[in-house]
Image (cartoon, rainbow, N blue to C red):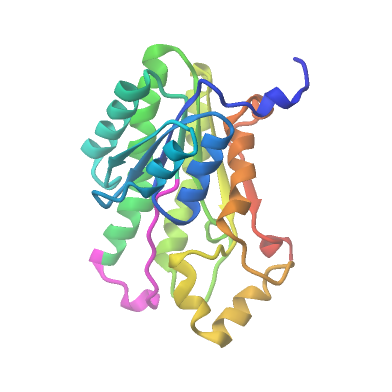
């Protein structure tokens, strides 16, 4: 195996990114396209096509597909549309996510079902739909799950359901890596720290809470979406052909204490 810059080249590869219309997902879509991949931007809001349009205007290949990952039929449809548009599927980035902030004693069944339905159940069925294509076509592939530091550490902010969902993502990653290794499908997780997105805006609007969480990062700041892209390219490319079932923290040192 020759070491070169080409190890990171994704030309000819086809990717799906869930939750790709904004935040971390949008940065990932642009990053994959920059390294040569054709991108299917899967998002929950019909008509939210800006990311795909921006990629095409920059000379890349991209299409938008409405997809609520909590509905397995929509997961299967998104995969089918990606294959129909670009002819194959090589990379799935499970980025779609949601959260709730409530004391554990106040969490409703509806909250539990919504968060688990997107963050864990949806991730599983999206992975299943992608893997079926990769297995059928004998192409192998990469499944990259966007987890969280909260899959490993606890907190006092009322995010118990989110913690449960992301902890599930971490062990599910390992299980799928074991099952699908024989098909050449590598499954890994990225564990971001707090990243400046719409989901963290409410934290930043409470100065005392923001300072508390910020200072738990060794780097004393929140990250930005673009800082997740390098890890995604690594896992999506030939630079990671001997890596599966792993969790890579991109967390500004939150988990090093």
- Work out which residue is located at the far bottom of the displayed protein and give it: 208
Secondary structure character of the magenta stretch overall: loop
**Residue at screen point 40% across, 54% down:** 97
Residue 20 spot, x, y in % from top left: 41, 47
64 in magenta: no
- Whether residue 188 appears in this view of the structure is no
**Residue at screen point 53% across, 36% down:** 32
Q: Is residue 17 above or below residue 201?
A: above
Give the number of marks. Answer: 0
The magenta-colored residue range is 95-110
Residue 230 spot, x, y in % from top left: 64, 43
**Residue at screen point 43% across, 62% down:** 162
Residue 110 spot, x, y in % from top left: 23, 65
Q: Is residue 185 above or below residue 200?
A: above
Q: Nearer the viewer, residue 141 or 85?
A: 85
Q: Quadrant of the C terminus?
A: bottom right
Task: Classify residue 161 by image quadrant.
Answer: bottom left
Q: Quadrant of the N terminus?
A: top right
**Residue at screen point 50% across, 53% down:** 24
Q: Nearer the viewer, residue 157 or 32?
A: 32
Q: Nearer the viewer, residue 125 or 43?
A: 43
- Whether residue 78 appears in this view of the structure is yes
Task: Classify residue 98 by image quadrant.
Answer: bottom left
Residue 130 spot, x, y in % from top left: 38, 28
């Amino acid at each position: 195996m020759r070491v070169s810059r080409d190890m990171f080249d994704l030309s000819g590869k086809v990717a799906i990114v869930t939750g790709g219309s904004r935040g971390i997902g949008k940065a990932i879509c642009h990053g994959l396209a920059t390294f040569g991949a054709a991108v299917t931007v899967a998002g929950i809001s019909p008509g939210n096509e800006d990311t795909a349009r921006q990629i095409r205007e920059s000379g890349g290949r991209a299409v938008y597909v409405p997809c609520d990952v909590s509905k397995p039929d929509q997961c299967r449809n998104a995969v089918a549309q990606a294959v129909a548009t670009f002819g194959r599927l090589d990379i799935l980035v499970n980025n779609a996510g949601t959260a709730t902030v409530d004391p554990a004693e106040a969490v409703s069944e509806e909250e539990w079902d919504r968060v688990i339905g997107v963050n864990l159940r949806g991730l599983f069925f999206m992975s299943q739909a992608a893997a079926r294509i990769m297995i059928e076509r004998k192409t192998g592939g990469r499944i990259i799950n966007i987890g969280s530091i909260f899959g490993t550490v606890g907190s006092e902010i009322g995010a118990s359901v989110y913690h449960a969902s992301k902890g599930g993502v971490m062990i599910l990653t390992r299980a799928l890596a074991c099952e699908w290794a024989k098909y050449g499908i590598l499954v890994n997780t990225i564990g971001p720290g707090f990243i400046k997105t719409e989901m963290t805006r409410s934290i930043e609007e409470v100065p005392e809470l923001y300072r508390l969480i910020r200072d738990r990062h060794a780097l004393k700041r929140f990250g930005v979406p673009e800082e997740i892209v390098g890890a995604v390219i690594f896992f999506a490319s030939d630079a990671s052909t001997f890596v599966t079932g792993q969790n890579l923290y991109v967390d500004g040192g939150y988990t090093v204490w």
